[in-house]
Image (tube, coloured by chain):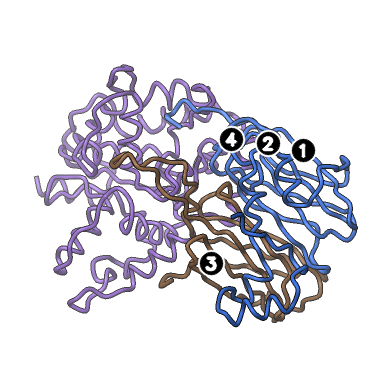
Amino acid sequence: MKRRTFLQGTIASSMVGAAVSAGLLTPRMVLAAWPESAFSAKSVDEALNSLVGSVTHSASGDIKIKAPDIAENGAVVPITISTSLPKVESISVLVEKNPSPLAADFKLAANSEGFVSTRVKMGKTSDLIAIVKSGGNLFSAKKEVKVTIGGCGG
Amino acid sequence: MAKKSIRIRAEIKGDVTEVKALMSHEMETGLRTDKKTGEKIPPHFIKEVVCEHSGKQVLLANWSVAVSKNPYLSFKFKGAKKGESVKVSWTDNKGDTDTDEETIK
Amino acid sequence: MKRLLLIAATAVVVSAFPLISTASPEDDLKAFRGYFLERFPNVPLEEFANGVYAIDASSREQWEAIEEFPPYEIAIEEGEELFNTPFKNGKTFASCFRNGGIGIKSDYPYFNTKSGQVKTLDVEINDCLEKNGEKPWDYEKGKLASILAYMAYTTRGQIIDIKIPHDQRALDAYEKGKQFYYARRGQLNMSCAHCHVDNAGNKVRADLLSPALGHLSHFPVYRSKWGGLGTAHRRFVGCNLQVRAKAFKLQSEEYRNLEYFLTYMSNGIPWNGPGVRK
């Protein structure tokens, strides 16, 4: 039986109360369900469908991806996603050619700036895709990052 | 966790606080094979990072195994003052957690 | 013999009995440094401490992004804790070094005239452990690398200034290190110099070869490839294996002599460990 994944904020409070008192869910876990099927999806569209319920996103010049053209080491690729779009609710990072493209999903509070920086693993040359949910709509940007095999046994 | 696994730096410039955090964690993908046993090394990674200020969640990060080992995270937010603190907590797929707080400078 | 050493010790510029060598280390250093400064004319001497990142803008940008909050910071903290934790007998590492062990990585490696061997900081740390009834640590990574990270950190900014005492054995150790560096080895039949001198700045598949000048300034090093910290000798082993040569033991005489030669060749460049590399 497939476990139901709860989206943030859509759980009926009575269910929550029962589950918490039964010791099945800690309050923190209730509010932050890890999107398992999105993370195990094998394609960008599958992941987006699972994560945000849509594959429709418009390319936006207001999303900047800072990532190397050629990654020095595919295991540690420093990336920064910044956007001037208003009311950013989430920023999702996908590595198109990774076995499971969805690498990270960031949920931003109202006072959070449209900016996240982290380091990701890229298995091979691939598009790095940023999906930004702003004002209820999805926007995207992408950048190709080349990942190579080194000569020094790397 | 006996050892501290989170290091935080928080700096405020104007009305924007920039937080940088470095965490110690294997972030094992589950795709690697143990050369000695031939078995796949099971995944061991941080699934969730919660960042708070004044008890309110500023950022929630859901991570996969594709985040690099000894993960780094940086984000920005408004509404804080110098001297207040930010808190970063992580939970991994084994249920282990750690948390740390840092003063905004 | 003692009188001659005394003369050398008082730094009077007198040509004492000539030591046997093909060229003096000072001449070698001038030639070595001059070669790299000419090969990379836009790179100031101190920048060579940053290796590949001194000669390639794209990888430098990635390195700077990682240096914003480098993964070796974890090791520096671990190292500091190890350094300050007393042994079972109550003493600490500070008792084994001058200045309480702070900012002294620059003393190493040095030629120990008593033992007639090159002494590295790695071995000194293990000597300190054993002297105080503790078990020695592994020379590849782990605790030793972490404590080295801390000691490198407190030494940052000092200028590399390795001395070769007026002692035939010291000069021999230096020469052996130099010969090792320029000798072909392994199935690929290449020497260290082939890649890091002759081809510094060129590519090996997609890897940019770092210049030998400044090579040991930034150890111990967190390599993304290792997913952790490692010592200089760990890297020597890796490099030897990469040309499909049989590697020597960590802290073997061969590698200690190599470290002696290589560090001397970086005299004048700042100590800037621990470092982070791909």
Say which residue label 3 marks.
Answer: B6
Say which residue label 1 marks.
Answer: A142
Gap between marks 2 and 3 measured at Cα: 29 Å
Gap between marks 2 and 4 measured at Cα: 38 Å
* Chain that appears purple: C
Gap between marks 1 and 3 measured at Cα: 30 Å
Query: Mark 4: which amino acid?
Result: Val
Q: Residue at x 32, y 66 (%)?
A: C101
- Secondary structure, mark 4, is loop
Query: Mark 3: which amino acid?
Result: Ile
Residue C167 drawn at (x, y percent):
17, 41
| Tag shown at residue C43 | 4
Label 4 marks a residue whose chain is: C
Query: Mark 1: which amino acid?
Result: Lys
Tint applied to chain A in the drawing = blue
- Secondary structure, mark 2, is loop
Label 1 marks a residue whose chain is: A
In which quadrant will I find the N terminus of chain C?
A: top left
Q: Is residue A67 above or below residue A117?
A: above
In this view, the mark in front (3 or 4) = 3
Please tell me which of labels 1 and 2 falls first in the chain: 2
Residue C243 drawn at (x, y percent):
34, 23
Q: Do the numbered discs 1 and 2 sit on residues whose CB atoms are within 8 Å?
A: yes
Tint applied to chain B in the drawing = brown
- Secondary structure, mark 3, is strand
Say which residue label 2 marks.
Answer: A96
Circle 1 residues within 10 Å: few <14, some 14–19, many ≥20: many
